[in-house]
Amino acid sequence: MTHPTDAATTARLHAIDALADWPTADLVQPSGHGVPDILSGRLSLHMMERPLPGAKTKTQAKSQALRVGVAINAPRTRDDGQVTDAPRGTIFFSPGRTEFIEKYLETIGDLVARGFWVVMVDPRGQGLSGRMLEDRLKSYVGDFQDYADDIGWVCDTLSKHCPKPHIAMGHSMGGTIVLQAVLTGALNPSAIITSAPMLGLTDLDSGAMRGMISGLSALGLSARNLPFQTQRRGLPVAFADNKLTSDKDRYARWASFFQNVPRLRVGEPTFGWIAQALKSMAFINRNAASLKIPGLMVAAGGDQIVTPLSIEDFARKANCDFHVVPGAKHELFLERDEMRDEFFAVIDRFLDEHGL
């Protein structure tokens, strides 16, 4: 079967025009890990500099470096059997803690095959975006609103070039980020989809523990690493000890980036990061009823990091669709095919039901 090319070529040129002012960024490819065929010629990575308001001294940063990936849609076959190059819209995707664009190349390919453009941002302090502290391994942020404003700025900068409707999507910390971005007006998408959004943490299920962490952060320990973490210095734990996925091959592929590319590594969370995460989760849960766009919240039934009940509670208060994938670990995008296929079937149904 031959595919039409004119629309795809036009879309590709427009994507290049939208990013022409920003230098290209590295695509990290450890040995044996190439780009999916469907993304060949469709993926572009750039370093964007977000101006930061309020810098008053020479020592204050005037901009935040953000690595941004843009992938344009592939031809697809419609329900009527016709092949089309017309894009369905754009997904603005925020990854989880420690994560980066390359981890999601398989997922980006799945979304591109469904007819979407995908814009993904390495969160500040992660991947190849600018790090926050002199020690590059520190997992730290001053406020989760910084994350939300970063992806909001990228969306504002590129939105006129990106086909609509715009859909916000995020995993874990990224789910928290896009929810906060929508609730604060930093993002204004037509819908939102989250995978295991960080709305309640299993290790921090008591008020006393949350209060202690927030207090220690306020007392000057914000840049100190949280103790008793199994992950050390940004290196992955053994597959048998991981809480992320039951898929050995996908875990090995993810782990190889950290094992072979030191500049991608991010260490255990700091007190400051956890304190700001707690603050963000409280804000989002408190304002759930203010979410006024269609939403899909998907939980992993075997999640040992985020509590599925917290996601279900939020979905109910926000009047969002909710689904749990039984037995799945935290990383739904990295799970075994049968669980991952169920996850994508739920996403497809949600998109179809809302005409997206």
Image: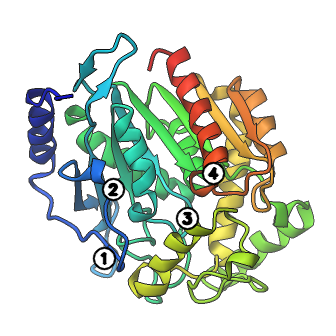
Task: Tell me if residue 344 comes above or below residue 217 in the rendering.
Answer: above
Alpha carbons under labels 3 and 4: distance apart = 11 Å
Alpha carbons under labels 4 and 2: distance apart = 19 Å
Q: Badge 3: how crowded within 10 Å, few (<14), some, or many (20+)?
A: some
Q: Secondary structure at mark 1?
A: loop
User: First in sequence: mark 3 or mark 2?
Assistant: 2
Alpha carbons under labels 4 and 1: distance apart = 44 Å
Amino acid on which the number 1 mark rests in the picture = Thr
User: First in sequence: mark 1 or mark 3?
Assistant: 1
Alpha carbons under labels 1 and 2: distance apart = 45 Å
> Where residue 210 sits: x, y (%)?
82, 65
Q: Residue 291 vs residue 246: left or right?
A: left
User: First in sequence: mark 4 or mark 1?
Assistant: 1
Q: Badge 1: how crowded within 10 Å, few (<14), some, or many (20+)?
A: few
In the image, which is nearer the foreground, mark 4 or mark 1? 4
Residues 161 and 292: in front is 161
Residues 50 and 109: in front is 109
In the image, which is nearer the foreground, mark 4 or mark 2? 2
- Residue lying farthest top? 80
Which residue corresponds to mark 4? 332
> Where residue 321 sits: x, y (%)?
68, 26
Any mark on residue 57, and which? 1
Amino acid on which the number 4 mark rests in the picture = Leu
Which residue corresponds to mark 2? 36
The residue drawn where x is 71% and y is 23% is 319
User: First in sequence: mark 4 or mark 2?
Assistant: 2
Task: Tell me if residue 235 comes above or below residue 118 in the rendering.
Answer: below
User: First in sequence: mark 3 or mark 4?
Assistant: 3
Any mark on residue 250, and which? 3
